[in-house]
Image: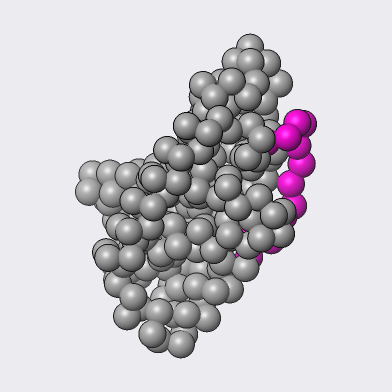
Amino acid sequence: MNLVTANIPLPWLWSLWLAGAGLAGLLAFRARWSMLADTRNLNVFLAATVAVLGLWLIKTGIKPGLSFHLLGATALTLMFRPLFALLAIALVSSALALWNGDWAALPGNWLLMGAVPVAVSWALYRFIDGKLPNHLFIYVFLNAFFGAALAILSVGVASTAFAALTGAYALDYLLAEYLPYYLLMAWSEAFATGMALTVMVVYKPEWVATFDDRRYLFNK
């Protein structure tokens, strides 16, 4: 879902800007910025951000504000951890806002398509990391495949609820014509994320901050 300003009532718009400002403040003070001082890390981060921007540009929609595209949020979360994943999605959202000229909807899009899937992906990773054995299959299948599917489904539920609560579209219409398509998107998101993470942990494990080959590969 790509929010458009015309569909957001003014009180909701101000609330989204306040929430977005709070999240931006958390990012500014808590992120370990020294990580990007390393040219290699910066290049990987920027390349991943551009790749996700490409995914967001390939989209389709049924009505204004009701669009579908792959997110890449789970891959970013596993590669860079949540704060830098949020930064990457903020850059992507800003680029699209500049392209579309709809800056007022920027924080809403960042929160809905950034904060929601990143939070879900990170919570699932932390649960799996603490409760299940360290194994490559578990990491890739649960964190990447299942995590990506769950993340985009959470965006579908959140965007449906938001559109209904703001009065942009009727709930019956959203449940019949919008939300079910996220089941199809979940498979695409899971496949793309799972394949990308599989290739990276095999050939470039240093690109994935949440993956340690000494834990997941050695003596397995």
Give how far across and how far down residue 50 sits, in percent: 62, 68
The x and y percentages for residue 98 are: 66, 60
Image location (x, y in percent) of residue 188? 65, 44
Residue 52 within the magenta-colored segment of the rendering? yes
Q: Which residues are magenta?
A: 51-65
Residue pushed farthest front?
A: 10
Q: Quadrant of the C terminus?
A: bottom left
Residue 111 drawn at (x, y percent)? 47, 45
Q: What kind of colouring is applied to the model shown?
A: one colour
Residue at image location 50% in from the left, 63% down from the top:
88
As rendered, which of 65 and 69 lies closer to the eye? 65
- Outermost residue on the top side: it is 172
At x 60%, y 15%, the residue is 171
Whether residue 73 is visible, yes or no, is yes
The residue at the point 42 percent across, 38 percent down is: 15
Q: Is residue 198 left or right of residue 26?
A: right
Q: Quadrant of residue 163?
A: top right
Residue 47 higher or lower than 23, as above or below: below
